Image (tube, grey):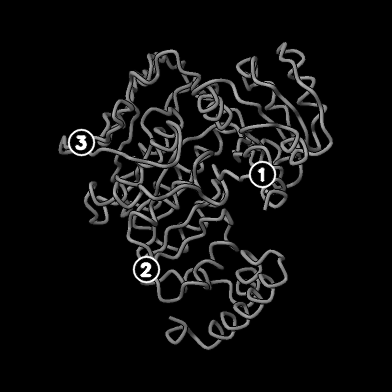
Amino acid sequence: MTTELPWRARIAVGLARVVGTVARRAGRHGSVLGGRVATLLDRRVLHRLAAGRTVVLVTGTNGKTTTTSMIARVLGGGAATNHLGANMPDGITTALLDHPAARVAVMEVDESYLAEVAAATAPRVVVLLNFSRDQLDRVGEVRTVARRVGDAVAAHPGATVVAFADDVLCAGAGLRAARPLWVSADPARWAGSARWTGDAGVCPRCDAAVAHAGARWTCRGCGLTRPPADWVLHDDGPTVTGPDGTSTPLELALPGHANRLNATFALAVGAELGVEPAVAAARLRGLEQVGGRYRTVSRPGGSTRLLLAKNPAGWAQVLDLLADGPPRPVVVAVNSREADGRDVSWLWDVPFERLAGHPLVVAGERAADVSVRLAYAGVAHRVADDAVAATRDVVGPVDLVGNYTAFHDAARGLS
């Protein structure tokens, strides 16, 4: 594609590829540096690189990386994608630089950058997964984030928007789309669930209180209700029902309800782009990990499974997963670097009481904060200096749950 670019852009792309290659070989920020250099030399390079491609943008608080990988897999491989999580404009630009011949691009996008990236890429499909509080010190209050996403959606009436109907904030953004498709979870799944709804108590249209009844919700003021679903995940089976009423079995290697819901989004996007749901489901069967998430590492005396949880909604999903089967030992690691967000007050919104009965160790730079929260929860635990070393003290399987940088530190330590 670089031969179709203006001379200045061709120079920017060529130099950026050299810088990106050198950075990757040196193990330093290879997923963003090339894009950063290209953008410095040509401010419109992202627009130029996206031109002529079918673009899918995936955003939301949780599940972006996994859903992006699933969609790319459903579309048959060969798509340009930033599936390792570099989801700001520099990382997206780098991914397009790395795949010049790909006619399809599937990109996860940080919620704060959706408007900018969509303006540059003219997406065919936008996926809205969910919205809840996350890195309050960086992105701000979640309802403000959802409104900005809604503005971005409204600015692209030609895009199909695949949105989660059960999430009030997500639905509020999706309702501003000219062409929405709605995804929902099986209502039976919500009975007794630990699903996070702490940020979804107010109507996105009139700010009145919202009443929840399982997956369904209704505004007590203006009467706005959950949109009728086009794609529904049924955990019994599990199966996915599409707009025509056809049910497609899911056979995933990735565990948990959250991943089945991510797969439902992938099937919906695949169908919009011409992939039959049965074909899409078959292509997802062999996916066992995404960027190290859910990877199980063998070690002397046992194994360690890596899990990512960086906010209350993400922890709700992990706690559901940990509740399957007998209690396993768990190591919790929390940092507060720039990529994590400095503010860890979200710890008090996580129902850590559910970890009672698990042999538990806490580590990471904010281990003391986690320890205080667990003490108030009445959950027995011990504090360790190093999360990876703590897993090696366990005989048998152990789960290591980290927030963003703690997770990646652990992944490197276990490699």
Residue at the location (62% across, 72% down)? Answer: 34
Tally of numbered discs: 3
Q: Are marks 3 and 1 in contact (CB under 8 Å)?
A: no
Residue at the location (80% across, 39% down)? Answer: 386
Check the picture and name the quadrant holding the N terminus: bottom left
Find the distance from the CA under tag 2 to the CA under tag 1: 44 Å
State the image coordinates of residue 84 (x, y, percent, origin top left). Answer: 56, 55
Q: Which residue is mark 3?
A: 247
User: In the image, 192: left or right of 394?
Assistant: left
Q: Secondary structure at mark 1?
A: strand
Residue extending farthest front? 301
Q: Quadrant of residue 299?
A: top right
State the image coordinates of residue 391 (x, y, percent, origin top left). Answer: 71, 36
218 in relation to 76, above or below: above
Q: Which residue is mark 2?
A: 53
Looking at marks 2 and 1 on the same chain, the residue that comes earlier in the sequence is marked by 2
